[in-house]
Amino acid sequence: MLKVQIGQRRRQCCDGVSRRHALRLGTTSLLGGLALPQLLQLQAKAATKQAAKAKSCIFLFLEGGPPHQDMWDPKPAAPAEIRGPFSPIATNVPGTQVTNQLPLCAKMADKYTILRSHSHRDNGHTTGYHYVMTGRRANFADGDNPVPNNAFYPSVGSIVSRELGTKSEIPPYINLPHPMAGGGPGFYGAEHAPFVIEADPTQPDFEVKDLRPIAGLSQKRLSTRQKLLAGIEKLERNASRGRADVMSTYYEKAHRLITSPAAKKAFDIHAEPRAVRERYGSTQIGQCALLARRLVESGCRFVGVDAPGWDVHFNCFPSLQTDLIPYADRAFSALVTDLEERGLLDETLVVMMGEMGRTPRINAQAGRDHWSMAQTVIFAGGGTKPGQIIGATDKQAAAPATEPIGVNDLLFTIHTLMGIDPTRIYYGPLGRPVPITDGGKLIDALV
Amino acid sequence: MILRQPTTRRLANARSIGGNLCARFVLLSCLVGALSAVDTPVLAAIRVSPVKVSLDSPESSQQLLVFGPRDDGSERDMTDVVSYRVVDPRIAVVDQGGILRPLKEGRTEVVVSLRQEQMRVPVMVTGLTSPRPVSFQSEVIPILTKSRCNSGGCHGKAEGQNGFRLSIFGFDAAADHSALLKESRGRRISPAFPERSLLLRKGTSEMPHGGGRKFVKGSARYQRLVRWIAEGSRFDSQDAESSRIVSIEVEPKLQILFGGESQQLRVTAIDSSGRRHCVTLETEFESNAGSIAEVDERGLVQASHIPGEAAILVRHLGHVAVCRITLPRPGVKITRPPETNFIDKLVWDKLQRLGIEPSDLASDAEFMRRAFLDTTGTLPNADEVRAFLKDTAADKRSKLIDNLLARSEYADYWTMHWLDLLRADQLKVTPQGTVAMQRWLRKQFADNVPYDRFARQLLTQQGSTLAEGPGAFYKAITKPDELSRSFSQLLLGVRIECAQCHHHPSERWSQTDYVGLAGFFTGVKLKKLPDGSQAIVSQGGRDLPHPRSGEVVTARALGAAPAIFDGVTDRRQLLADWMVDRDNPFFARSIANRLWAHYLGRGVVEPIDDMRDTNPATNEPLLKALADHLHDVNFDLKAFTRTLLNSRVYQLSSRSNTSNRDDNQNFSHAAYKALPAEVLLDAISYSTGVPEKFNGWPQGYRAVQVWDNRMPSYFFRIFGRPVRASVCECERSNEPSIAQALHLLNSPEIMQKIQHRRGRARQLAGRKLPPTSIIDELYLGTLGRYPRAEEKTLMLEAFTGDDIDRRAATEDVLWALLNSREFVYNH
């Protein structure tokens, strides 16, 4: 077995070596020399108050801003320029209606909850993304910023990674099929950055970057290589002793990822029966949702799926009708049903939302524009109460008519469901306290 | 009671057993036994401080400190080893931790005893029947701070918590007073029924409180709040001026602790009338090195078993004091290695005090690879290594240092470094702006322009942002206060951004300092030129108002008198004069520390750009000497670097010994440094013999030379190339990740380099060389050294067997070397 360890932080980001920083780093073994009482203290602090209902979370992010009124919050009584061309249909929950674009989800509305009163005040894409993922308003202008754009605040996925850690050789936090713009680790550092699978699982040649065995290397050469590398490190370790002991385990993790049959299996979407793949739809969101299920089955804590294309400013209804809503409808309904059939729904929280909703009034280009004042968020599994509608918007689907649910309420609830204390504080590079969520409260009706 | 049982407290078990004297006796004997034989009365004298106690208000308290002698004549803490008894228990009460509290006016004595030995301390209690009214400002704020009500995670954050907002750490007492009294329809304070005040019912968790219980009903904190409300919730006492706290003292200030020992601290506040009172229980404590010494909320310092130094920061009402704890290795006498220059002397001094043995000198090969990577960001080539190892000249290391500093790669490497710091993000400052800055930087480092001149030009740049020069910085940052705080962090190593919003009580810089510094940049404008580009113009300018009071603050440098701009057109000139002055307390220290951190892997102050009283240097004499040296060489950075690299400290091995294994702040051995993304990519390209192709760039450019920070690159992304969004060195991530390891181990990109038909592996395999020579060449070209015998044996395994493919074997050895820790790190 190859056991190679590299990786020792040269500087711990901006932080010094203060006690609270050592604690907040959560990577104490890297620093070396932590006293036992501290480790115990750390463990004690890490123990969470509530027993977690959800062990994993699949976060389907409809990037661009899904039109809530054309999907989950139909307004049949509103004038045509508001209600749009889609009509409501009944679901299997008496009294609950969605639009006729969601026929599959309509048949299983008892399995999820529709939260219609989400509202916030950031109407930009990257800034809104940042806000939804971190609970903090962006300090940059919308648009020209790098990915990941949350330079300071950690995203919900990074928080989950830090709080819950790994369960297997699968990384605890994964993004598909590209990095989520607001999904970075902020000051938590690269250790809690998402493992990004930058490949499209719909493609026949889908594979995880750098994971496939190099072509043309015989088994014999592979084992020679491992023997050589393990040998070098062994000789080196003997020579340098102490330092080597505190080196991080990333190489080992990577190697486990490459060689572990479990990891290989988790990423191997081709192993799914054709019927299952078709059930999710041969679409990016569908296959990502399926891969996400495989990943949480294998121990991943938080899978963020970025499903782009929802920024429908122009002539939106044809595309909503053909390749946006039906794909999401199929992917979401298949995912929830599949999880339930496998007995995983109770311990897997599924959330589907975007950075905002869309304008009540259809614009002159037959599209809808950004509208963060109202959005519908869908929750399933993970200890949430299914089959409900929470909140409502006004007649035009323009603003919550009930108490608005903010971004931090959503995050507070997600963390709580996963057994994470949302009020826990870590200290940023300047020593400022950064609680996991910026306020917020539990959405009581949901849990 | 607020006297929570501190968990780390020594003898905590014995005390929780309460009256179990037997248990306590056993422990006590063990302890005494540890010092000397149990039967001999060696503890000739315990010392109790203070010699008399005066308690003058109902909630006052006094921490007693008890010291006993060590064998070596120094003193150790006996505060919670001795036993205490108040002669008249109606007058006062004392706990096992040495805290004395009043019960009734009068006089008595407290008897401090250890075995047969006794000391008596007179106690006088006054001010209970008609106490001095509680002052919100000086007596309630510390309660809100100590209970963390006004912390940044709670009511202290900008928007408050659940509608109740306090100033962070109580820096704005007047606003807090009015928040408590006037907001929320006065429910927070109930003058008629003090105990029904929301403040108390929430604080004690009698009513549901998101923050939980902050103080216990009946505790001293609680009693003081009740009394404050009952007395009419005054902002200040009548004798406000004379009772204003002017300073605090911590005792002891310096203490040597041996592994596992503890030390109780005492904090005394001194008011403007000279009156002293103990505020230990109302003070916040924090250790800057918890792995060496921890401190609990009562001020009990607990030493670990790791030798080193920790600073215990003590904060009370905006005042800061520091207690330095040293943990020497017990009974170690180190052999001081020879000294090349002052650096070695000062580092050995420190190590001697701590009892830490420095590592051996690094081998020639280790030194060479390290010096190459540190100064030029490149690896030595095989011929250079061979020649250097063969060279027998005594001064060959010095010569190599001179040679490296003269190379163009030195300028390239520092140019890249400063492009990051100066935020040359091409998307923000345009590609032309980035190139203009790159060319300027390259010239500065190639010509070795003195750093004070460099800084002055940076500070006072005028003209087109596209002309060769640092002008793009003013395009990346446009607001006066952002400019001033960026320059402060960059050139002074002082972070003042906290002071934008509040005066952090533990820091020196206030909002006045913040706007005062920004006042130097208020004349800076970006003027549009006819061709659409921009030019920096700096003339005139105005003083800025204080964000709270609105009063205009005259521009001033940090800690300096208000500036006088008579006849000065560009205000920034005055700031530059102040900065580069020999007496400037920050400028030389900051760059000295920055360079030190680059070469040694850790700053003397860390983080390197966060110098403040509360973040002391690990070796203050060293940092001072480095700063002085920089002045002595007139800010010649190459000369300074030469001194640094010639020191034995720089040339120590990264191999630790048993004595310094746990030391990571005293430079007892060389650090393992992660290679920056660009340097690592260049090293891989060099070692495989296959240059990287950068899209759109001519062949032959090294990654270090690529100014385009937006060039898409998976390698740069996962290895943490900065996006140039801040002036902080910390933006460059050195943290490892799974993706990095996967990429190096198993990516097609690296594989292609290893297998390339014009690559090193194939070339070597194709030459008529025996396998041992191939292995030699691969080691020289990656790790910069010859393989040791056992390594050669190991690698030869790739070449043994029936159907050996030389090319495959060579590739496999190269692959293994590229993935070794020794390759991926600079050590």
Image: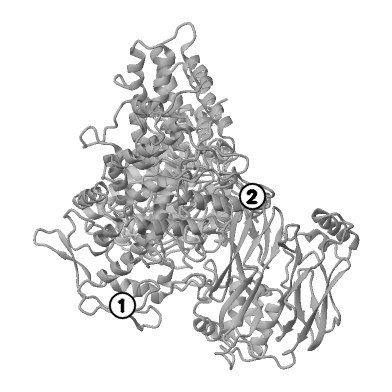
Q: Nearer the viewer, residue A229 or B560?
A: B560
Q: Quadrant of residue B523?
A: bottom left
Name above or below for residue A187 compared with residue B661.
Answer: below
Q: Nearer the viewer, residue B479 or B337?
A: B337
Q: Which residue is under mark 2? A: B306
Amino acid at the residue labelled 1: Ala
Name above or below for residue A237 compared with residue B326.
Answer: above
Within-10-Å neighbours for mark 1: few <14, some 14–19, many 20+: some
Asked if badge 1 and badge 2 are on a common chain, one would say yes
Task: Report the chain holding disc 2.
Answer: B
User: Which colour assignment does the render follow?
Assistant: one colour
Q: Nearer the viewer, residue A336 or A318?
A: A336
Name above or below for residue A118 compared with residue B65.
Answer: above
Contact, CB < 8 Å: mark 1 with mark 2? no
Quadrant in the picture for the C terminus of chain A: bottom right
- Local SS, label 2: loop
Name above or below for residue B517 compared with residue B594.
Answer: below
Position of A28 compared to B11: left or right?
A: left
Where in the figure is residue A246, as x and y percent of width and height?
A: 57, 40
Residue at image location 39% in from the left, 21% down from the top: B777
- Local SS, label 1: loop
Q: Nearer the viewer, residue B40 or B827?
A: B40
Where in the figure is residue B36, as x and y percent of width and height?
A: 82, 55
Position of B419 compared to B25: left or right?
A: left
Position of B618 compared to B459: left or right?
A: right
Q: How many marks?
A: 2
Residue A184's disc is none
Q: Which residue is under mark 1? A: B563
Q: Is residue A233 visible?
A: yes
Where in the figure is residue B305, as x and y percent of width and height?
A: 67, 50
